[in-house]
Amino acid sequence: MCLSALGCASVPLAPRVTGDEAGLLAAAARTPKRAAIVGCVPAPLAGSEPCVVATRRATDLLRDTGLFSHVGASLPDADVTVQVHPQPGHDEDTPPSNPGSLVLSAFVPLWWSETSGWRLSVRDRAGREVEVDTRRDGTEVMWGLAALLNVAPDRGFMPDVEREAAQVGVQLLPLWPPSPPAED
């Protein structure tokens, strides 16, 4: 039986980065950059989260990558500029939009397809641009026994911010110069 709202959910998680990718991220984090978030393109549709919310979430995500020393809306000396491409909002017909679904989901499994992840355009001072796209479609489940689904390594109670940040970080690596080889 569902003991809490978190125990009633099962969501798809971002894939884990490989050991090599984690090493590259750690090396890039030694030379952090400053990022300015310049807004949302295109403007969010009605029913989507407002641009101010999307940029705040993107700011937190970029900080979590470990690749940036400062992230903000107005950094005149930023090394990179970031445009956020907001996700469409929840469909009004999905279970999370219906308050009665929480009660019903304790006994009956409810599922729907949801797009998770991020899409960002990042440009550095040299004009190099990287399109970050970690979006993926997955099935979200609300059910009293959804915790049983979460034993799978690619599912969880809620999105894993650390995994998502690592995926974004890996896609940003082309903006960092390669590290010099270690001397023996």
Image (spheres, grey):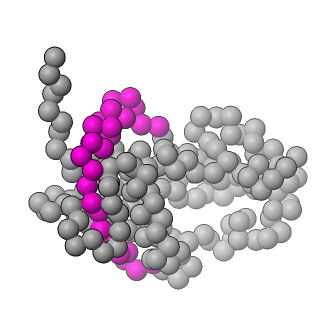
The answer to whether 21 appears left or right of 176 in the picture is right
How many numbered marks are there? 0
Q: Residue furthest bottom?
A: 46
- Magenta part of the protein: which range? 16-44
- Tell me the quarter of the picture where residue 25 sits: top left
Vertical placement of residue 106 versus 48, above or below: above
The answer to whether 157 appears left or right of 51 in the picture is right
Vertical placement of residue 81 versus 42, above or below: above
Please tell me which residue is depicted at 76% across the width and 45% down the height of the picture.
Answer: 146
- Rendered-image quadrant of the C terminus: top left
Asked if residue 27 lies in the magenta stretch, the reply is yes
Which percent across, then down, holds residue 98? 76, 71
In the image shown, does 11 or 122 lie closer to the viewer?
A: 122
Which percent across, then down, holds residue 30? 27, 42
Which percent across, then down, holds residue 32? 27, 50
Please tell me which residue is depicted at 88% across the width and 46% down the height of the picture.
Answer: 1
Please tell me which residue is depicted at 30% across the width and 68% down the height of the picture.
Answer: 36
Q: Residue furthest left?
A: 126
